[in-house]
Amino acid sequence: MASPELAPLAVEFGDIHAQNIGLLRKLNESTFPVRYADKFYGEIPTLQTDFAQFAYFGGFAIGAICGRLEPADGDASGKRLYIMTIGVLHAYRRRGVGRKLLDYLMDNAAKRDDVRVVYLHVQTNNDAALDFYARHGFEKVGKIEGYYKRIEPPDCYLLGKVVNAPAGATVGGLLEGALDIANKRP
Ligand SMILES: CC(C)(COP(=O)(O)OP(=O)(O)OC[C@H]1O[C@@H](n2cnc3c(N)ncnc32)[C@H](O)[C@@H]1OP(=O)(O)O)[C@@H](O)C(=O)NCCC(=O)NCCS
């Protein structure tokens, strides 16, 4: 008999700030194959709460998303939104938590006229994340070889989704600079 599907989890959201950053560090260490440097955690409290949140279940942080607004290429008034991390503890996956975190960020991005595109990097062998983002309408823009320094494979895909961009704009065009810079990294 097939096992019954687990019901979606009713999570609550909460801001990430300097006082609870240790929680994010613990969560990330249980979720990602890379260890983020202190510089990464130093930046998190500066992120807008529209794009950075914990997901709590039963009072425990079980997931988080962190997104950073950046200037858009060749567009003085435009922005692009970079998803630095999104992660859900293993035991709570496939219960809609990742979707809720991503929807929160995407809905807040869509409310702003200046956010042209949302983008991120995913390791080429991370099928779960690639399926997750494909399901949410993200497209592969390119492959960046040697992006990661201490994990195998070291390559990633750049994925993106258009938000509020002029008619005819493509995700590839909006992220040309991001791909170009990454490919020229020493
Ligand atoms: C990617 C991640 C955040 C998804 O979180 P999640 O809470 O499990 O995602 P959801 O339950 O909201 O999934 C939404 C949809 O995405 C797709 N999806 C998610 N995980 C999947 C998997 N392992 N395999 C195939 N499809 C998957 C499915 O279509 C799913 O809908 P369904 O369960 O109704 O079929 C989670 O797997 C994770 O934390 N991975 C480790 C960290 C990571 O790689 N982050 C991404 C790079 S920053």
Image (cartoon, rainbow, N blue to C red):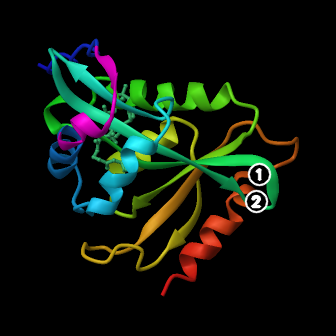
Residue drawn at (65%, 49%) of the image: 80
* Mark 1–mark 2 distance (CA, rounded to whole Å): 5 Å
Which residue is the site of mark 1? 170
Query: Is 70 left or right of 12, judged from the image as shown?
Result: right
Q: Which residues are magenta?
A: 11-22
Foreground residue among 12 and 120: 12
* Mark 1 residue's CB less than 8 Å from ligand 1: no
Q: Residue furthest bottom?
A: 186
Residue drawn at (15%, 17%) of the image: 59
Residue 132 can be seen in this image: yes
Residue drawn at (44%, 44%) of the image: 46
Q: Is residue 30 magenta?
A: no
Q: Is residue 16 magenta?
A: yes
Helix or strand or loop: what does disc 2 sit on?
Answer: helix
Amino acid under disc 2: Gly
Helix or strand or loop: what does disc 1 sit on?
Answer: loop
The picture quadrant where one finds residue 179 is bottom right
Residue count near mark 1 (Cα–Cα under 10 Å), binned few <14, some 14–19, many ≥20: some
Q: Position of residue 78 (x, y in %)?
A: 76, 47
Q: Is residue 13 above or below residue 18?
A: above
Residue count near mark 2 (Cα–Cα under 10 Å), binned few <14, some 14–19, many ≥20: few
Q: Position of residue 32 (x, y in %)?
A: 23, 53
Quarter, ligand 1: top left
Which residue is the site of mark 2? 173
Q: Is residue 82 above or below residue 20?
A: below
User: Do tag 1 and tag 2 residues touch (Cβ < 8 Å)?
Assistant: yes
